[in-house]
Image: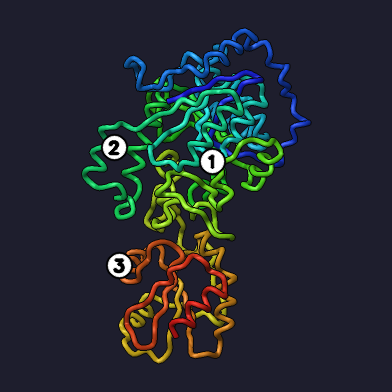
Amino acid sequence: MALAFTSSTSIAFSSSRTEQGVQLSSTKFQQSDRSHLVSPAALNLSRKRSGAVKALNAEPRRNDTIVPSAATVFAPDVVEKPIEIEDIETLAKDLEDASPLEIMDKALQKYGNDIAIAFSGAEDVALIEYAHLTGRPFRVFSLDTGRLNPETYKFFDAVEKHYGIRIEYMFPDSVEVQALVRTKGLFSFYEDGHQECCRVRKVRPLRRALKGLRAWITGQRKDQSPGTRSEVPVVQVDPVFEGMDGGSGSLVKWNPVANVAGNDIWNFLRTMDVPVNSLHAHGYVSIGCEPCTRAVLPGQHEREGRWWWEDAKAKECGLHKGNIKEETVNGDGNGEVHAKGSVSDIFNSNDIVSLSRPGMENLLKMEDRKDPWMVVLYAPWCQFCQAMEASYVEFAEKLAGSDMKVGKFRADGDEKAFAQQELQLGSFPTILFFPKHSSRPIKYPSEKRDVDSLMAFVNALR
């Protein structure tokens, strides 16, 4: 895996996004404040050697953790006692309202050489820019899964040149990848879920990398995935991975842009004129491996572009598995836990019929219906269902008084298994059309959930 250190003039690459609302003019961090950390001679030496770094596979065998290369400018050692868990909780509260710049500066100041920025090739380049603005040296690494888009590799190169740094990469174990592909094929994740592939190509390489650190910096934001990231703190004890000291609590995870909105990140990137992945201009928001990433439509949440064939619980690859809450008896099976009646219902309209389990079973049994039906399978906590509520209500209003019936069926919790087995439920929301003279429902195939698209689908089948 690759590391990169920089001074106020040399910067490394990261994995996060940035906030527009940061007021740089009010910050106390000036480049001159950190000029004593790295000598000009060291920086010049770094620039001269940066192009001559050997590939990792050409180096002598060593411990497979994040290891500084010959072209790295080392951050000064920080002599400080390991932080206890209770200190991290206090620190998180103290920094809850701090700017990303202040949070980044605190992280780099506290951990020195023992912290690194994780860079994914998306808008988390903002993390690198924030680190650069602190004037402190910092390290950057990235996971090369072997399945990234060509545009992402070009982006890596552009970032290295822009900041004058080298990103070192962690690669998956070739034997494990070979066994997976030979046994299950190149695209097994479309059939049995992406977790196994991500475990081989991302999670295990990351685990090796983090064993060489005491802390890492990510680009997680609360608004990225309301289902799994809505409670991400700005700093936490990592609940999944271990650091160099080993054991639970040995690694600290920093999320400087946890409280920043996605549009503020983009405003910041435009203002600072930093390189961005060209895929963003083609509708890609959240970017991962090529087979598991696609552009999203206007109005869709960014995570709908990742692992779109799976439900909300699967929207984490394992790098941030600690975000997923444990399910309880009343869990909905999508990484969300809700007591009955704790979430307000949606799709409430006099023109929409609320169907019970027996009602859905009867609808399935009918081979000669008097009226056709359109039914949405939903969960009221699902942000994608919430996003289409207005259009679905308007759609029902347009059909009021016609021979078409519009209904809803809450398909989470205890009803989820039934919906998956009998109603083609893949993810929320799922929309079904029940024709007059057929017992088999037809699944609405598009992710365009506006009124015109829904009407076009119904009119084509009525």
**Mark 3 sits on what residue?**
421
Residue 164, quarter of the rendered image? top right
Give the number of the disc on residue 177: 2
Residue located 64% across and 26% down the image: 132
The residue under label 2 is which amino acid type?
Answer: Val
The residue tagged with tag 1: helix, strand or loop?
loop
Residue 82 or 279: which is nearer the viewer?
279
The residue tagged with tag 3: helix, strand or loop?
helix
Pointer 3 local density, CA inside 10 Å: few below 14, some 14–19, many at least 20? few
Instruction: From the image, state whether disc 3 or disc 1 is nearer to you.
Output: 1
The residue tagged with tag 2: helix, strand or loop?
helix
Give the number of the disc on residue 122: 1
Residue located 49% across and 45% down the image: 287
The residue under label 1 is which amino acid type?
Answer: Ala
Q: Is residue 292 left or right of residue 27?
A: left
Residue 57 or 260: which is nearer the viewer?
57
The residue under label 3 is which amino acid type?
Answer: Gln
Q: CA distance from mark 3 to mark 1?
A: 37 Å
In the picture, the quarter occupied by the N terminus is top left
